Image: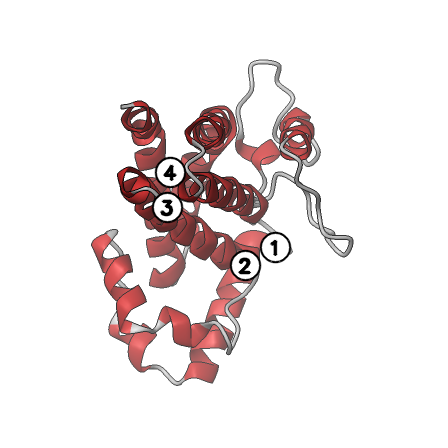
Amino acid sequence: MKNEHTKHVKLADQRINVYQFLARIYKKEITPEFLPLLRDPQVLGVLLDFGADLDDDFISMPADELIEDLAVEYTRLFLGPGQHIPANESIHHERNDADWGRYWGASTVEVKKFIESAGLEYRTDYKDMPDHISVEFEFMQKVIEKERDEWKDGNVERALYCMKMEKKFIEEHIARWVPLFCKKIITAAKLPFYRDIARVTKDFVEFEEKNINAYISDAHA
């Protein structure tokens, strides 16, 4: 790897880690295997840096009790039954063509085509919708991983192509609905964990939207 690309690789790794972490948070309930990672001091430190303010119960509560409480909250917030907040773009992305507010709206189709046009495929056992927040974040993770690998190989033009794809997906999809989705979680959450995670997610997406052009300009320099 050429020295002049080291900073781009480092930035890509940082962004990959955040997208991967958030994708896992929204994908399913917190499991006994995942909780120790969340309680890791280094991870907690990063969350605090992002503005999370997890209470003492998150650290001190017995794991089985905390996992049960978080599972109930996850189900209530994202799955239902009853009033809940579906984690799908087509529900929240307020489009000019009015084809939103339902599952499998126009945004769902657009995201599916976007992901497939990038050469990525869904796992054969995948059953969720293409515009679920965890899928969109996993897509960003994969594209940034590709960008990072191109930097490592010294392929500047290919790395820039990946970055432009990231910019398009952020601006046309993620930034158009995730902050609004997070605001709804912040209002509806009863436990600090998902409220704080929603704040972190909102701030991160807005930061990405604000800075993606600077990332690309810096890569051109």
Q: Which residue is mark 1?
A: 79
- Picture disc at residue 205: 4
Query: Is residue 150 positioned above or below 172 on the image?
Result: below
Q: Position of residue 211 (x, y in %)?
A: 30, 30
**Residue 44 seen:** yes
In the rendered structure, the answer to whether residue 175 lies left or right of residue 219 reads right
For badge 2, the amino acid type reads Arg
**Marks 2 and 1, how far apart in space?**
6 Å
Q: Earlier in the sequence, mark 4 or mark 3?
A: 3
Element under label 4? helix
The crowding category of the residue bearing disc 1, from other C-alpha atoms within 10 Å (few below 14, some 14 to 19, many at least 20), is some
Q: Residue furthest top?
A: 96
Q: Quadrant of residue 61?
A: bottom left
Q: Which residue is mark 2?
A: 76
The C terminus: image quadrant: top left
Q: Earlier in the sequence, mark 1 or mark 4?
A: 1
Looking at the image, which is closer to me, 1 or 87? 1
Element under label 3? loop
The crowding category of the residue bearing disc 3, from other C-alpha atoms within 10 Å (few below 14, some 14 to 19, many at least 20), is few
Q: Position of residue 16 (x, y in %)?
A: 42, 49
| Contact, mark 4 vs mark 3 (Cβ under 8 Å) | no
Q: Which residue is mark 3?
A: 1
Looking at the image, which is closer to me, 84 or 107? 107
Q: Position of residue 159 (x, y in %)?
A: 45, 32
| Contact, mark 1 vs mark 4 (Cβ under 8 Å) | no
Q: Position of residue 165 (x, y in %)?
A: 50, 28
Query: Is residue 57 positioned above or below 128 on the image?
Result: below
Element under label 2? helix
Looking at the image, which is closer to me, 101 or 162? 162
